[in-house]
Amino acid sequence: AMRWEWRPTWALFRPLAAYGAWTSISNTVNPLLSYLERFLLASLAGVAAVGYYTGPAEAVMRLLVIPAALAGALFPAVSAADGHLATRADGMRLALTSLRYLVIGLIPIVLLLIVLARPLLRLWLGADYAAHGTAAFAILAGGVLINGLAHVPSAYLYGRDRPDLPAKFHLVELPLYVLGAWLLIRAYGITGAALAWTLRVSVDAVLLGIAMWRVGGPSRVPAGE
């Protein structure tokens, strides 16, 4: 009979614990960053404003299913390629290729949503929603494009064993987002909430993109990429 012996490998425990801790921090803070503007909107502009904001927001957020699926496939590929220099270059190539596909796939959809924001809302939710939520819908559509692209560097960093970077970015963004969202919602209401979310994901995308480039390194990008 086969015997199994449990022998803890303490050399592996520390990096695994650190990876799990940073991932837990990011998973805790990220929902706050995703929905905080709605709570502030309810507090500053009333519950009715949240209704006008939530419908368009939930509709356009469905587009994030596409980059989330792509990131889910990219993560194990980058993680498996983290062994030596040649395969790391393959990981960066995969990340850049994923970004290209997302740009090609998402930009036409987002542009269509922005151009047709008012008639789509009028047809789907009625004239009242269209009057209040068109600007927010268009702004959020642009934000979803940026946030969708940010899934790629995020997955790359997790695959390269750097979950600390997204978590640190989120911790820095949280208090700034609270202040920015409060100011924008107080000034512009529903449109301000959409602006706050879009600005936050734009900053996050830039930080993640820079981090991916620094971790991957331009020297690891194959020729022709």
Image (tube, rainbow, N blue to C red):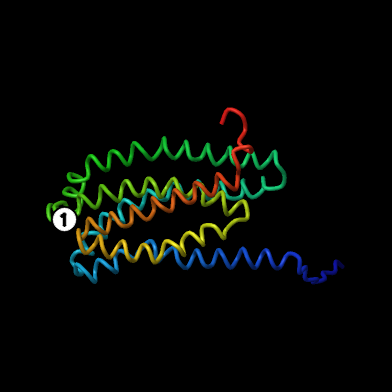
Q: Position of residue 73 (x, y in %)?
A: 55, 47
Left or right: residue 116 versus residue 204 is left
Q: Height in image: 102 above or below 129?
A: above
- Write the residue at 68% across / 41% down: 87
Instruction: Residue at 85% x, 69% y: name it.
Output: 3
User: Relative to residue 179, is residue 84 depicted above or below?
Assistant: above
Camera-side residue of 185 and 120: 185
Furthest toward the right, the residue is 1
Residue 67 percent across, percent down from the top left: 45, 47
The answer to whether 59 appears left or right of 9 in the picture is left
State the residue at coordinates (67%, 48%). 80
* Residue found at the far top of this picture: 224
Q: Nearer the viewer, residue 82 or 116?
A: 82
Where in the figure is residue 120, as x and y percent of width and height? 21, 46
| Total labels drawn | 1
Residue 58, picture quadrant: bottom left
Tell me if 119 is positioned left or right of 65 in this view: left
* SS type, badge 1: helix
Q: Amino acid at mark 1?
A: His
Judge left or right: residue 36 versus residue 24: left
Q: Residue at x 51, y 57 (%)?
A: 166
Q: Which residue is mark 1?
A: 132
Quadrant, the N terminus: bottom right
Q: Residues within 10 Å of mark 1 (few under 14, many from 20)?
A: some
72 or 164, which is in the foreground?
164
The image quadrant where one finds the C terminus is top right
Residue 221: x and y in percent read 60, 36
